[in-house]
C-alpha cells in the first residue's frame, strides 16, 4: 500500500487489493518501522486500484499531535451562532441569565446559570473569544466519536443510521446558525468519518423524501419536513437522541425504550 494523504485522525492509502472494513492494520515506514496502528473505515474502488481510509487507533503516530480534552461549547450554551456579534451575545446572555438565575423561583437553575456566566465571560472578551474560537473550530471539524461504531457501516442498518446522522447534524446547524444553515459534503465527511462515496445514496434518499435540499453553493440544508421528522421521532428513537446530543442540540428528547434503530429515516 502507498500513502496518499494524512491528518491527525487518519491516513488515506492506495492499494492494488481491497481490504475489509474493520481490519486492524499496522502502519509502517518504507523501512518497515512501525509508526502507529489503525482500523480500516472504508474501501472504495478507484479505477484499477482501491482507496483505503484508515483511522488511527494509537496516539503514537509519527507527526500526529495528541488530541486535547473536549471543550465546552459556549455557543451552544447560549444557543447562538459562532458568528454572533458582541451585542447579540450580551442581549442573549441578559435574557438567559435572568431566566436561570437562582433567585428566579420559577425557572432558576444554578448549574445552567454558572454555565451561561462562564460562556459570557469568554465570548464577551475579544482576546479570550479569539483563543476559544481556535479550539472550538478544531473540535467542530474533528470526527464525532459516535460514528466510529460499526452500526453506521454495515449493510442496510448502517445506511439507515447514516441518514439519522446527517439529519442530526443538519438539525443542529440550522438551529444554531439560521444565517448559515448549510453543511458541505466535506464537513459531513469530516464529522461522520465517512468518504463522500458512502454518503451519495444517503443524500439522494433524504433529498427525495424532502427532508433536505441543496443550496446554490452545494451545501445540504434541512427542510421544514426534515425538522418535523427529527422532532417527531426523537422522543422514541434512542439512537437519534444520542446523535442529537453528540451534535449538541437535543430537541427536548427523552430517553425511551425503543430499539436504537427503530423509526430510522425511511
Image: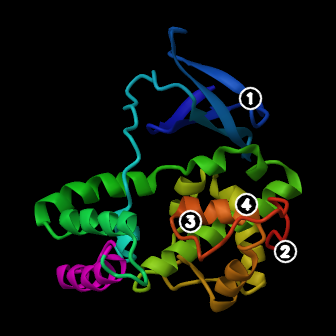
Helix, strand or loop status at disc 2: loop
Task: Decide which of tag 2 and tag 3 comes sooner along the chain.
Answer: 3
Q: How far apart are marks 1 and 3 (CA)?
A: 26 Å
Badge 2 is on which residue? 266
Q: Is residue 200 visible?
A: no
**Stretch of the chain drawn in magenta:** 82-102
Q: Is residue 132 magenta?
A: no
Please tell me in which quadrant of the rendered image residue 90 appears: bottom left
Where is the N terminus found, in terms of image quarters?
Answer: top right
Task: Decide which of tag 4 and tag 1 comes sooner along the chain.
Answer: 1
Left or right of 115 on screen, residue 128: left
Badge 3 is on which residue? 185
Relative to residue 171, is residue 132 depicted above or below? Answer: above
Relative to residue 140, is residue 64 depicted above or below? Answer: above
> CB of mark 4 within 8 Å of CB of mark 1?
no
The residue drawn where x is 54% and y is 35% is 11
> CB of mark 2 within 8 Å of CB of mark 1?
no
Residue 194, image x, y percentages? 64, 52
Amino acid at each position: 500500500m502507498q500513502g496518499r494523504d494524512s491528518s491527525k485522525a487518519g491516513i488515506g492509502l492506495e492499494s492494488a487489493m481491497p481490504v475489509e472494513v474493520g481490519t486492524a492494520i499496522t502502519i509502517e515506514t518504507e523501512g518497515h518501522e512501525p509508526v502507529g496502528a489503525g482500523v480500516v473505515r472504508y474501501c472504495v474502488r478507484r479505477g484499477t486500484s482501491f482507496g483505503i481510509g484508515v483511522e488511527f487507533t494509537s496516539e503514537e503516530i509519527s507527526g500526529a499531535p495528541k488530541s486535547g480534552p473536549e471543550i465546552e461549547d459556549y455557543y451552544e450554551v447560549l444557543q447562538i451562532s459562532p458568528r454572533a456579534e458582541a451585542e447579540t451575545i450580551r442581549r442573549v446572555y441578559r435574557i438567559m441569565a435572568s431566566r436561570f438565575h437562582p433567585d428566579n423561583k420559577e425557572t432558576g437553575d444554578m448549574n445552567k446559570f454558572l454555565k451561561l456566566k462562564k460562556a459570557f465571560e469568554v465570548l464577551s472578551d475579544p482576546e479570550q473569544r479569539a483563543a476559544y474560537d481556535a479550539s472550538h473550530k478544531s473540535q467542530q471539524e474533528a470526527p464525532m466519536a459516535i460514528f466510529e461504531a460499526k452500526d453506521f457501516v454495515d449493510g442496510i442498518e448502517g445506511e439507515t443510521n447514516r441518514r439519522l446522522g446527517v439529519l442530526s447534524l443538519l438539525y443542529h446547524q440550522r438551529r444554531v446558525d439560521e444565517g448559515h444553515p448549510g453543511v458541505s459534503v466535506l464537513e459531513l465527511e469530516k464529522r461522520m468519518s465517512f468518504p463522500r462515496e458512502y454518503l451519495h445514496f444517503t443524500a439522494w434518499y433524504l433529498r427525495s423524501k424532502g427532508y433536505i435540499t441543496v443550496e446554490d453553493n452545494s451545501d445540504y440544508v434541512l427542510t421544514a419536513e426534515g425538522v418535523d421528522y427529527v422532532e417527531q421521532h426523537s422522543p422514541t428513537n434512542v439512537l437519534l437522541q444520542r446523535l442529537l446530543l453528540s451534535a449538541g442540540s437535543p430537541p427536548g428528547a427523552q430517553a425511551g425504550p425503543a430499539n436504537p434503530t427503530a423509526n430510522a429515516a425511511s
